[in-house]
Amino acid sequence: MPRLSAQDRRVELVDATVRVAVAEGLDAATVRRIAKEAGVPLGTVHYCFGSKAALIGAVADSIKPPVIDVGHLEQLPTHEALLAAFRAYWQQIGSDRRRQLLIYELLTHLARGDEDERRIALQLIDHTYGAVLSALERYAADLGRSLPVDAGVLARLVIAVADGVSLSWIVTSDDAQAQQVMDLFAQLLAGALDATGEQA
């Protein structure tokens, strides 16, 4: 077994946890199963993290929010720009059904936990909200328009719709249906943005 730094070993154990949880579900990611997946003694997991809760927290921290690039979208009509942004967003969250399911499992697991675990769940959600909020604010600024509602509320609306579509898609695996809903939402949101008109 190669000798790794404590930090590298932690990364390896997080990766092993994700592999197990994605393939078999979060409940299957026991410390013993994770150690086996990583090819390390059971004590190594406890040494690196101290507890299973700490390891699960590290897994949550490792999940990166989607990257939403709105650069140059201001050159497109609002509907086309939002359609392109939503499709790019969906390609990221919809690229791996089991990994998306893991995110929801993590959120519900952490939400049932103690104060520290609930804090991690909030951070996980806030990372995604932040990515959407930043994209919305940049897009509106590029257009020289105000948003029709508070930007934070609008970001949460986008995530609520995306999560609803994603949960249904996890069960049905109907890519076309998911895309139709996201496309319709892009059209409706574009209408709301256009209704504000350009700022004077």
Image (cartoon, helix red, strand yellow):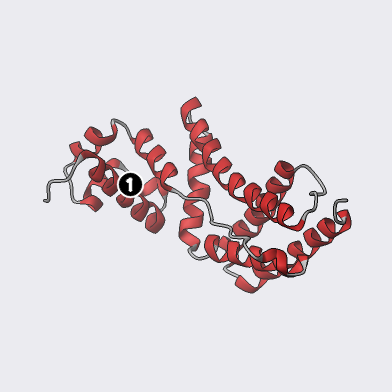
Left or right: 17, with 172 as reference point: left
- Of the pair 166 and 191, the residue shown nearer to us: 191
Asked if residue 160 shows in the view, the reply is: no
| Picture coordinates of residue 12, whole percent (x, y) | 27, 49
The amino acid sitting under disc 1 is Val
- Of the pair 77 and 6, the residue shown nearer to us: 77
Task: Give the structural element (helix, strand or loop) at label 1.
Answer: helix
Left or right: 50, with 199 as reference point: left
Based on the displayed image, in which of its 4 quarters is residue 86 positioned? bottom right
The residue at the point 51 percent across, 31 percent down is 119
* Above or below: residue 171 compared with residue 120: below
Left or right: 34, with 186 as reference point: left
Instruction: Please give the residue where the numbered disc 1 appears in the rendered image.
Output: 14
Residue at the front extreme of this rendering: 200
| Picture coordinates of residue 92, whole percent (x, y) | 53, 62
The residue at the point 44 percent across, 43 percent down is 60
What number of labels is visible? 1
Left or right: 124, with 181 as reference point: left
The residue at the point 46 percent across, 59 percent down is 98
Asked if residue 143 shows in the view, the reply is: yes
* Above or below: residue 58 compared with residue 23: above
| Picture coordinates of residue 68, whole percent (x, y) | 58, 58
Q: Residues within 10 Å of mark 1 (few under 14, many from 20)?
A: many
| Picture coordinates of residue 69, whole percent (x, y) | 58, 60
